Amino acid sequence: MTANGHATVDGFERHGLPPAAKKLAEQMLAILARDAAPTPCASIHWLAAACPGVAGRAGLALTGLCLTACSGPYSALDPASGSAQAVAILWWSMFAFAALVLLCVLGSWLYAIRRTGEPGNDPDEQRAQRRWIIGGGLVLPTASIVMLLAFGIPIGHRMLPLPPETGEALVIEVTGHQWWWEVRYPDTGISLRNEIHIPVGQPVDIHLTTADVIHAFWVPRLGGKLDTIPGRTNVLRLQADRPGSYRGQCAEFCGVNHAHMQFTVEAHPTEAFDQWLEARTRD
């Protein structure tokens, strides 16, 4: 016998899901099983198997879907350079600190709602109230800002296009258009569209300009993002620590085809890059 909103297979011991919701949950589980398995942060399939019922597995599937951002071609938490590693460290530090503050606030809130008795004019109680105001309203925000600046300023300094300790930085000129990227290698005559080639282990200064509106150049796994401003040239320092193909994206809404304004950064070993540069120069 069936009943609306119940699962007959278990003797009405738990609520089931409507057919549409059940189908959606099963589709999400199938997507995670196919795509999220290689992702280190999304290894939740054993939890889904241990949690009975489609509703429980759907909740775990949603959790895993949120965790898949820990890796992937556009994940700033999967760095492939020293600059991107610093960004990831800063993010995790801010996340941990924010979680600690949240726990403290929740603890204070629980303590406050469980207190009994009426507020009085006892001097000790008034002193305690002042300590809470000073500690929570002045000391905590000031300490938080100081700690964030202590982490953020050195990390931001590492992203500046300062003179390298050894050798010289490779200069590449990139111009944003609606909705594509023009890439030029000065003094070589090489011009590319939506692709950049760089050597591994060498600093690269990306000189960013725009032919129309504001765009934002961002390769999440190699460093921070920087805007292209009409009439200005901004310089972004990138350096890949290992060979590979790294995806980039315009991160500033620039029009109807903004989402498709993507590009690829190919990082080659030094000898392979020299060979590529020589071959393209001859062409």
Image (cartoon, rainbow, N blue to C red):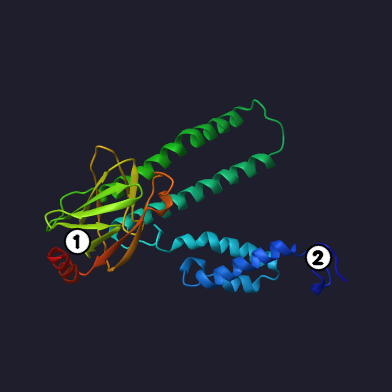
Amino acid type, mark 1: Gln
Amino acid type, mark 2: His
Question: Could you tell whether 248 is left or right of 276 in the image?
Answer: right
Task: Point out residue 253 in the picture as x, y percentages from the top left corner.
Answer: 41, 44
Q: Nearer the viewer, residue 55 or 249?
A: 249
> Neighbour class for label 2 at 10 Å: few (<14), some, many (≥20)?
some
Q: Is residue 49 above or below residue 183?
A: below
Q: Is residue 280 above or below residue 155?
A: below
Quadrant holding the N terminus: bottom right
Outermost residue on the right side: it is 1
> Neighbour class for label 1 at 10 Å: few (<14), some, many (≥20)?
some
Q: Is residue 78 above or below residue 121?
A: below
Q: Secondary structure at mark 1?
A: loop
Task: Point out residue 117 in the picture as x, y percentages from the top left corner.
Answer: 72, 34
**Residue position marked by numbered label 1 in the rendering:** 202
Q: CA distance from mark 1 to mark 2?
A: 62 Å
**Residue position marked by numbered label 2 in the rendering:** 6
Task: Point out residue 194 in the picture as x, y percentages from the top left corner.
Answer: 30, 57
Question: Could you tell whether 54 is left or right of 281 in the image?
Answer: right
Q: Earlier in the sequence, mark 1 or mark 2?
A: 2
Quadrant holding the C terminus: bottom left
